[in-house]
Amino acid sequence: MHTRYATISIFILLISSTHAVFTRRPHPYLSAANQFMAPQNAARASLRIRPLVWDANLARYAQSYCNQRRYDCDLKHSNGPYGENIFWGSGSGWSPAQAAAAWVSERKWYDYWSNSCAEDQECGHYTQIVWNSTERIGCARVDCFRGRGVFMSCNYDPPGNYIGEKPY
Ligand SMILES: *[C@@H]1O[C@H](CO)[C@@H](O)[C@H](O)[C@H]1NC(C)=O
């Protein structure tokens, strides 16, 4: 009954041939933590779901996992005890705000009444973000070696995306 969705294996792949336009962070005045959180808590607020709170332990977990991925930048999950959204972007300059906005943008694929994503679309990053019983978040970002791109990860506790349960 408490089986979680295979969102463990879902990911977002953003390949931009024009990544140079993103070399300036859109919100230089926001800390990385706030960049990660703002779009996600805005999505929750629009559903009247209480905000996620930044958690230093989750952030350390995410950073340690990002550091492991630094060599290959592969879109692999850590398979830990937390919910996890991961992001990869080619080139450099991808900001935490962009990763969070990309996940939130899956909202258009989620249908609440059938509790499912549109055919052939991902919405599991979004459903983790708006999972009502998730309370804490911690995220990290790394520039991978040898120009392999940027890897970012957010971890969520308690985790969401349980099969057969609605997020809210
Ligand atoms: C969401 O969580 C809050 C706080 O735990 C709870 O009061 C509320 O009933 C929950 N809403 C839903 C739809 O489950």
Image (tube, helix red, strand yellow):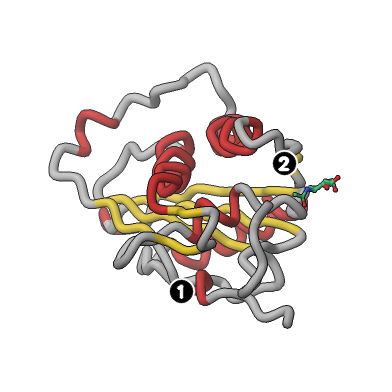
Residue 61 at what x, y percent from top left?
Answer: 67, 60
* Circle 1 crowding by C-alpha within 10 Å: few under 14, some 14–19, many from 20: some
Residue 41 at what x, y percent from top left?
Answer: 63, 35
Q: Which mark is residue 103?
A: none
Mark closest to the chain's N terminus, 2 or 1: 1
The residue labelled by disc 1 is: 9
Residue 21 as seen in the image, left or right of residue 102 = left
Name the image quarter holding residue 84: bottom right
Residue 6 as seen in the image, left or right of residue 147 = right
Name the image quarter holding residue 43: top right
Picture residue at 40% right of the left edge, 63% below the top: 11
Give the quadrant of the N terminus: bottom right
Q: Amino acid at mark 1?
A: Ser
Picture residue at 53% right of the left edge, 17% below the top: 29
SS class of the residue under badge 2? loop
Q: Is residue 19 above or below residue 5?
A: above
**Numbered marks: total:** 2
SS class of the residue under badge 1? helix
Q: Residue furthest front?
A: 113
Picture residue at 46% right of the left edge, 65% below the top: 69
Along the viewing direction, whichever of 28 and 110 lies nearer the viewer: 110
Along the viewing direction, whichever of 37 and 121 lies nearer the viewer: 121
Q: Residue furthest left?
A: 17
| Separation of marks 2 and 1 at Cα, in angstroms | 23 Å
Asked if the beta carbon under badge 1 is closer than 8 A to the nearest atom of ligand 1, the reply is no
The residue labelled by disc 2 is: 52
Q: Is residue 160 above or below residue 53?
A: below
